[in-house]
Every structure is written in structure tokens, then in C-alpha cells.
Image (cartoon, rainbow, N blue to C red):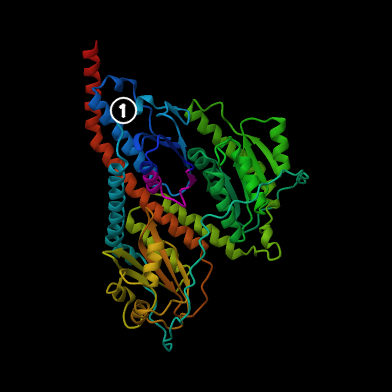
Amino acid sequence: MGLNGRLEDLPLLDIVQVVAFSQKTGYLSVETPRGEAAIVFERGLIVSCFTPDTPVIEARAAQLAAGERAALIRKRIEIALEELVRLREGRFQFSLTPEVPAIVNRREIRGETLGQGIKAEELLLELARGMDEDRRDAAAAVESGFAEAAEAVTPGPDPVPIPEGTLGSGTTDTATDTAELPEEPAFEDKALPPLPELEALPEEEGRHRIVLLVDDEPDLRAVLAAVFIEGNWQVVEAGTPSAAHRAARSLQDLGLPFVLVVDRGMPTSDGASFDGGLEVIRRLKQAGFEPPALLMTDRMTRPLHERGRKLGVARFVFKPSLSRLDPEQFAADIRAFGEHVRDTILPVLEPAAVLLPPVSAREAPLPRSDEAWREAADLQRRLEDLRRPQDAGQVSALVMSMARDFFERGVLFIVKDDELRGLGGFGPAAHDDIILVIREARIPLSEASIFQEVVASGRGHYGPLPLGRFEALLLDSLGAFRAREAALMPLVTNRETIALLYADNPETGAAMPRLDTLEVFLSQAGRALESAFLQRKREARAGRGESGARADRTGLAGSARQGS
């Protein structure tokens, strides 16, 4: 049974149903940002599941009565599955086995495996219901919190007296989906001359220096990023080779050169080795990106040095590892290490960060403009805001604030009861304040329209609006003025569109700007909402489980006394 691929293409809920329907025995390995996870099946029934954060079950659990122990293992399976089905990115692979394995991905699972499996549909139905509840809760929270968010956004000026026009007719210009690109052809190492010795350039006023930091350990990456930011570096983070490739492409599209700082010892995309850092450099080189690269490593051998040099590694640096058993000392060591890299190595590599367009576009290099620098810096600041604890109203306010930087007018709709309902916005309207106008707006999603298409697909529309019935009604309410194009951008949580941003330029009729950073921000805003609601569930579960945990400990102790 050859079942493998990417979660970007096939949601985990669908994958589990395929395995369950086929009634196979084996395990489904899932790549997560924190490491390997797995779901174990016996003739299509789920008998075990764990994530990298699932604790090893206590040995004392074996002393529980059979029913109590099965209930404990089932609860662990439910918690792990709930985290896994929310993943948007990563690889999966199903491995057939003649019987339920005792060890999966180097983890001993005999003590956390059910003797009688669970029907997948039982768990999946509950998980799907929970995700639907989260989407409804997120939409309701955005709706209830938007009144405050809208007040935080200053209404736009009154409409200028311009003869009313239309957005124009034309075919739908749906943006190309570039979330996953075809794999590049195999790359052969070729000897490359070493980079010349460079001297640090004096820092230019207003210049934003960018580091693409790639490491699969989020905590370590966060410490290094904070240290680099303190030194006035812009930091873009990635945790896997695939994420690094996408981040590099985004920087490339913005015309922003960068220095690559990458850890060698992360898993490769296929999980075959822990030379993921070299894979990152190789994949970027295949795509035509040649940033000056600093390879962090906890060991150095002659073959590794030669491989790195052939790929174009400019510098090697040893990363602290011996103090890992002492968390405080290790944190101090990593910080000192980061300061050394920031102060002595990055300034020397940065002058070599010359923008090289992809091989297919070498004849038309992208400009390195001050505007692009400012755009990247602003995006980073706004993403930092999303990383802090947020409620839905704050996320909505951040989305609208970001939209004001790109468009003269913006309207936010919520998806509710199979229709779009206007929440609020900014900019001019034809007859009244735009917030009063838009809160009366209703657009059915049961009938074909560009709005229905964007909500269903989760992909934006950019360009002239098709002049259908509902498009015309919206423009009659708002007033098109000079606008010739519009953007419809979805806000997605748990793979479903919960809100829709409409934006255009009615005052000047200006062409639509580049929207790369706005798309990135909307994607991260959706994830911020997901994280907020998942964290709320964890906290609620932890609160409910406190008394249960005490009861479990009492039960374990009682069982131990009876056994003695």
C-alpha cells in the first residue's frame, strides 16, 4: 500500500479514513515541526497514537484494571490525534506491518497500545465536530470582537465627487496557487571556489539586514532570533528544509537578499539522515538562490567540510551542545553563541548577500528597493504582534490595519449561516459611513459567485470582479468610483474560510499593489486564531484533568497496595 505525500495536498483526516477503510495493519508516520509522530493501526482500527510531545506512559499504569488502563490510553490517543489533524504542512507515509509493531519511530509503544482498537470513524467524527466548533467559535469571536476592532480603525475620508464608474467586466483572474512547487531535479555536487575574504561594510542608515534562520528546534531558534533582532537584523525563521525553501522564495519575490544561518543536524525531508542543513543549501542552490551561508554544526569531519564547501558554505561554526543537560547553562551558552555569530560573522557575510534571481529569471532581476526593505520590516513587526497572546478582536484589528497599508478601502465579511455578513471596514462609501453600509450587507453563498468560489477554495481572487448579481449589489452599496480591480482574500482556520477581506482603490483607481506580504499575514492570522482556540482547549482540559489526575494517582497507589 503506497500511501505517502504532503499534508498540504491531503488533510490528515482524509488519510486516516483511507487507511481505516482499507483495513490495513501498520503505522502512519507524520512529520511535524517538533519531530516524528505516528498513528498505529490494526486491521484499520486505531490502537495507538503519539506526537513528539506525548509523554511516555508511566510504568505504574500497567497496574490499573484493564478497563481503566484502556480508558487512559484512549484519552492519550484522542489528545494526540487532535493535535495531528490540525497540521497543515509536513510529510506522511504509511508502512505496512504483519502485526502491530512494538517500536515505531524509535519509540517503544507496547505499554501505550490498546488491545482492542477504536473505529476511526468514532474518533474522526468527534474531531471533525470539534474543528467545526472551533471554526464557529472563531467566527463568532471575530464577529463579537469586531465592534471594538472597527473602532480602532479610523474611518476613511468622505468620498471624493468623482463620476461613479464600475469595476469593469472580464474573466476571473484567480491567483496562482504556489503553496507547493514541483520538486527540482536531482542536484550533483560540483566543486565551487571558496568565497573571497570579505570585510564588514559600515551599516547604511535605514538598511535592513536579513537573516534566514533555519533550525528544527523552536526554543533554540527563538533564542538566536531574539539575539539577532537585538543587533538590528531582520529574522525570517524556518523549521524544515521545505519551509526554508518557501521562505527563500518569498524573500526572492520581494527582491530582498539575505544571509542563510542553518543548522546541519536537522532531519532531511525524507527522514533518511540528519544532514537537513546541507539539504537546505542544496535546494536553494538548485532554485538559483546563492546566499552567503553559515552552517552551524556540533561536529566537524573532513567529508562534511568538503561537502559544505562544494555547496558553497562560507563559514562553519560549532554550536554548543555539551551543556544540554543543564537548561539554564545551555540557554546561556546559546545566547553567547548567538552574540558571537551576530557580532563577528554576520557583518562579514552580509556584503555577499547579493540578490540572484532564479535560474529561469536571470534575465529580469528583481529590484532591491527601499520600499521592499520597509515592507519586509513592517511584516516582521506585525507578525511579532500575532505571536503574542491574541483574542479574535485583536486579530481582526491587525488584519484591517495591515489592509490599510495596501488599499484605500477594505471591508471584512464573516462567513455565517451559509452567507457573508459585513462586519465593518474603512474607506469611502457611496451614500453613508462605510461601517453603517457594510453591516447591512448580506451575500448568499448558496448561489454561484466569485465570493462563493473564494470561500470554498480558500484561494484569493485578484483583478476585475465578474459582474454577476451579487458583485453588482455590493458595488451599488459601496460605490465603485474609480476602482478597476479588487482583491478578495480569505481568512482560513482549520482549513475552512471563516472571513473574507474585500479591498480596492476607489479614490485614485491605482493598480493593485504586490500583495505577497498581505497574503502571508492573513495566513498567519488564521493560524493565530487556531492556536488561540487550541490553547484554550488545552487549558480547559488541564483544569478539568487536575482532579482526574489526583484520582488517577490515588487509583495507581491503591492498585499498588492491593498488588502488594
- The residue that disc 1 covers is 115
Residue 340 point in image, percent of width and height: 62, 38
Q: Which residues are magenta?
A: 3-18
Q: Looking at the picture, does residue 114 appear above or below residue 235?
A: above
Query: Is residue 282 at all visible to an observer of this figure?
Result: yes
Question: Is 14 inside the magenta-drawn segment?
Answer: yes
The residue lying at 64 percent from left, 55 percent from top is: 257
Q: 237 or 289, which is in the foreground?
A: 289
Judging depth in this view, the residue of 96 and 38 nearest the camera is: 96
Give amino acid for label 1: Gly
439 to the left or right of 231: left
Quick check: 494 above or below 319? below
Q: Position of residue 267 (x, y in %)?
A: 55, 37
Residue 206 makes an appearance in the image: no
What's the residue at 28%, 30% (across, down)?
72
Image coords of residue 50 (percent x, y) = 39, 34
